[in-house]
Amino acid sequence: MNVQPTTHRYDPHMSAISAKRWARTVKRHFGFLERDFGMAVIGTDDHSNWETTVTYSGTASAVVVRYSVESDRAEVELIRLVDGTVPPVPIFVHADTPINRGWLDNLLAVREPVAAEELRHLTGLGHRSVERTLRFEAEALRKYAPDILSGDLNGFVDIERSIRQQVSAHPPRITLHLPEGTQQPEVDRAVAKAKTLDPRVAVDVRFYRKPR
């Protein structure tokens, strides 16, 4: 699912930071989740070069604070627990896909569009940029998501509304890039393989010119 609010170019020279360092940074801004909402850190993860995460969880909801190289930003994900656990991320979202995860951006888009627009411009992974973004996101959580943090999951209606609007405007698609001259049987096999991920997702084929 993970519908991103914006897209940034991945810098191959960057890598995610250590979970220990990220947890210390996040705690300075999001420690209120433990003090005021009874949440606890249930996990950290720095196994990927693309991101480092800290996950806070209560009895009904969770918050993931992510250092994302791919998105070139610090970002916050809100989660509705399923049977007391963090649900997996769906590969694609359809009209009937349960929405149990969404960005803080999705919530703000419905509850406070001005703040959502401000957050959209808070990018960068330099120290000052990260501190500025985390400060803004922590304050936004306090102000606009106390119901979800307290376990009232009716607030997820707003997150779901935002995500479904995005999916309606931009349905999921798979794009295959194949070299010019690829024979049709090979194209068909590639499309069929892509369809195994989700037969309901359209597959586009693009051809590129191989270098001489």
Image (tube, grey):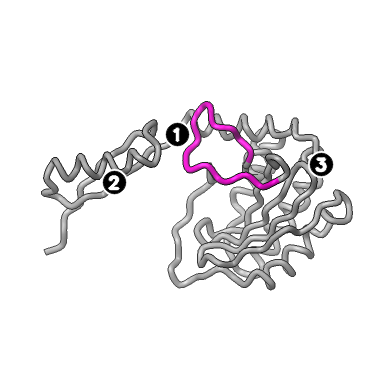
Q: Residue at x 74, y 69 (%)?
A: 24
Quarter occupied by residue 109 = top right
Indicate whether residue 209 is drawn in magenta.
no
Residue type marked 1? His
What residue do we see at 85% from left, 49% from top? Answer: 37
**Residue 86, percent across and down?**
66, 47
Check disc 3 and report the residue beneath it.
Answer: 146
Measured Cα–Cα span from mark 2 to mark 3:
42 Å
Main SS of the magenta part reads loop
Q: Is disc 3 placed on a helix, strand or loop?
A: helix
The answer to which image quadrant residue 59 occupies is top right
Amino acid at dot 2: Leu
Q: Quadrant of residue 53?
A: bottom right
Q: Residue 199 appears at what percent x and percent y?
A: 37, 33
Give the residue displayed 31% in from the left and 37% down from the top. Answer: 203
What residue did someone put label 2 on? 176
In this rendering, the label closer to the viewer, 2 or 3: 2
Q: Which residue is mark 1?
A: 170
Secondary structure at badge 1 equals loop
Q: Residue furthest front?
A: 83
Return the x and y of residue 137 as percentages of the image width and height: 71, 52
Magenta-highlighted residues? 85-100
Callout 2 environment at 10 Å: few (<14), some (14 to 19), or many (20+)? some
Identify the secondary structure beneath mark 2.
Answer: strand
Few, some or many C-alpha atoms within 10 Å of disc 3 (few <14, some 14-19, many ≥20)?
A: some
Residue lying at the far right in this picture: please name it.
Answer: 36
Amino acid, disc 3: Pro
